[in-house]
Image (tube, rainbow, N blue to C red):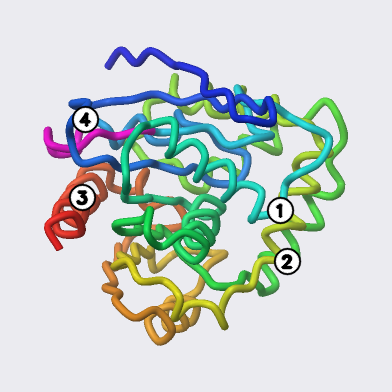
Amino acid sequence: MHLLPADARLRDGTVLAFVEHGPSDGVPVVFLHGFSDHWRSFMPVLPHLPPRVRAVAVTMRGHGGASQPRAGYAISDFSRDLLEFIDLLRVDRVVLAGHSLGSAVALQAAIEAPERIAGVVLAPGFASLTGPAVDEFADAVHALTDPIDPGFVAALQQQAREPQLPSGLFASMVEHSRRMPSRVWHAVIDSVRDFDVAAELPRVTAPVLLVWGMRDAFVTGAAQETLLDGLPNTELVVFRAGGHTPHWDDPGRYGREVGDFAARAFAA
């Protein structure tokens, strides 16, 4: 698949990288990557989306291919960038499909601007992220210095790698993740750990699809229960053999689930 990356310049000068796939008048779905990733994370999914979907995969600030300002890495900062980016797409509403960090950003945007969000896919989702595995990972991230060790990045990605992810793409993912400086790694992991919107979940008016892998080492089933209890309109899809990266575990199933959900969200 040949994709032509483009840049979106926000009002404050921040530049986000993105790609589009599908018809310009299709159902708009914006894909938001996980911590240290970039738009390439969703390349395995794009061929599996229904032809009616206009898929836009964006690289968020600080990550490989986007601007890396000295500050501005709270989840609310990512959300403000996202909402301005949606304006640049010239659409009234979109479906957001987030992975990990991207799920937090999507959820924050749905709280802040419910009129702009037709639906939300959280894969995996959480209202807050805690636990021993998270603490251990945060400690490892804070130990990083520049240049980023490629072995650390490869080990981080390896646990999610499946046969469906080509080796060339895996190498590209690692290389682009290394382009994120250590100060951004530190700031983003702190923002993820500070994120807690459990009390604000009732403000989300859009339908929400939770996609969770039972082998996820970071996001628990209890976190899904919190979302199911707190969000007004939610459904859960479980990838029983999946881990923290459902869109790599089974790109075909993930793409079909997102496409069907997006169609239902806009029909509603």
Instruction: Name the residue located 77 percent from the left edge and 32 percent from the top edge.
Output: 69
Say if the magenta span includes residue 48: yes
Instruction: Name the residue located 72 percent from the left edge and 47 percent from the top edge.
Output: 73
The numbered mark at residue 253 is 3
The alpha-carbon separation of the residues under discs 2 and 3 comes to: 32 Å
The numbered mark at residue 47 is 4
**Label 3 with label 1: CB-CB less than 8 Å:** no
| Of the pair 165 and 107, the residue shown nearer to us | 107
For badge 4, the amino acid type reads Pro
Discs 1/4, front: 1
* Dot 1 alpha-carbon crowd within 10 angstroms: few under 14, some 14 to 19, many 20 or more: some
Q: Residue 179's quadrant in the figure?
A: top right
> Which residue in the structure is indicated by mark 2?
194
Vertical position of residue 134 compared to residue 100: above or below: below
For badge 3, the amino acid type reads Arg
Q: Measuring from the top left, give residue 98's x and y in whole percent.
A: 43, 51
Q: Measuring from the top left, give residue 116's x and y in whole percent.
A: 38, 53
Q: Measuring from the top left, give residue 64's x and y in whole percent.
A: 62, 26
Per the rendered image, the range of residues in magenta is 47-56
Q: Earlier in the sequence, mark 3 or mark 4?
A: 4
